[in-house]
Image: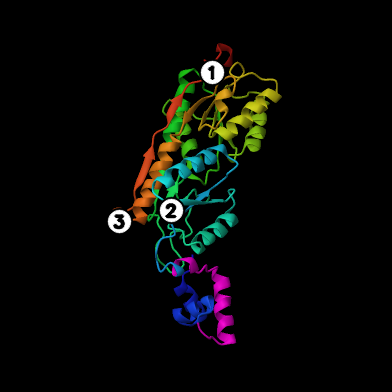
Amino acid sequence: MATIRDVAKAAGVSTATVSAVVNGSAYVSVALKARVMAAVKELDYAPMSAARNLKRGRSQLIALVVADLANPFFARFVCAAEAAVTEWGYSLVLFNSDEKPENEKRILSRVRALSCDGLVWVPIEPAGRNEGRDGEGGTMPTVLFGRVVENERSDTVTIDNCSAARQVTNYLLDLGHRRIATITGPLHLTTGRGRLDGMLEGMAQRGLAPEPRHIRDGAFREEVAYAAARDLMTEAEPPTAIYVANGVMALGVMRALADLGLSCPRDVSIASTDTIPGIGGLRPRLTRTEHPIADMTREALRLLVDRIEARSPPGPRNIVFQPALILGESCAPIAPSAH
């Protein structure tokens, strides 16, 4: 993201001139002002007026940028974050990127302009956007939550996605399933990639591999997973089990089975990573791995406050939580005829 120095270089002026233009603090000729504003627009520069007014003090604001607020997982994250920040005397400013890169870019620019003290960010792209730079070229304390990007400067709090998928896959294999399908998240995200890799590793350890047609991208969306499940279960030789990479998609899969007149686990076993509120009320109860969301959220905020208050070591800290396998009734031993 552009700094005041970048704007000055692009416009061929000093940083003092850029400051005078964006703040209106001194006379600048019309021609020079036009040149500076053209550079501001081209570079998408967001001046930190609030920070200047505070003379580098703290706003006591923490920005929380989530990827999809319609996903109950992120709603739980927001509630846990709100409870955590009040203990440290901060307030949250919430943004939802809706898994859209253009939204994310606009939001990160807005975070800088608001002079937030720090950022907890669920990124939606595999590479960072220099999100840790504030409008004056300084570093904004940042913690990446749930997903990892190519950014060595930021602390991260994640779940062991490979372990989550491997636990579920091993459980299905122990029940005798061999024709196992998966509905994944986007593979450019570490959550989607990690969960697919864990499933593949679990099968490879037994000398097995899923059929290529049995690996479907569900985009972490209920309706996409619904369509994928319908396709899978109307094949001539459908899978006997499906590993679903998150709870929202699991709802879509269960709806697809109901609409097809199929029964779980009689016709197909279903297991997932992640859970959402209300999923425990499903019948049969879903076998799944669960995230310790409250603990993960509190740790992310603790790391961030440590950064804001300069209590942290210089290097990035990467905290990985382990998921827990919760057994329900959505999986059953393979029927002898299915082999």
The residue pinned by badge 2 equals 150
Q: CA distance from mark 3 to mark 2?
A: 18 Å
What amino acid type is highlighted by mark number 3?
Pro
Q: CA distance from mark 1 to mark 3?
A: 47 Å
User: As rendered, which of 37 and 310 lies closer to the eye?
Assistant: 310
Toward the top, the furthest residue is: 336
The residue lying at 50 percent from left, 83 percent from top is: 26
Magenta stretch in the rendered image? 26-52
Please tell me which of labels 3 and 2 falls first in the chain: 2
- Asked if the residue under mark 1 is in contact with the one under mark 2, i.e. CB atoms within 8 Å, the reply is no
The residue pinned by badge 3 equals 314
Q: Is residue 161 visible?
A: no
Please give the label number shown on residue 329: 1
Q: List x then y, in percent, for residue 89.
A: 41, 50
Membership of 67 in magenta stretch: no
Membership of 34 in magenta stretch: yes
Label 3 environment density (alpha carbons within 10 Å; few <14, some 14–19, many ≥20): few
Give SS at disc 2. Answer: loop
User: As rendered, which of 93 and 195 lies closer to the eye?
Assistant: 93
Q: List x then y, in percent, for residue 242.
A: 56, 27
Q: List x then y, in percent, for residue 37.
A: 57, 77
Give SS at disc 3. Answer: loop
Label 2 environment density (alpha carbons within 10 Å; few <14, some 14–19, many ≥20): few
Label 1 environment density (alpha carbons within 10 Å; few <14, some 14–19, many ≥20): some
Answer left or right for 120 relative to 44. Answer: left
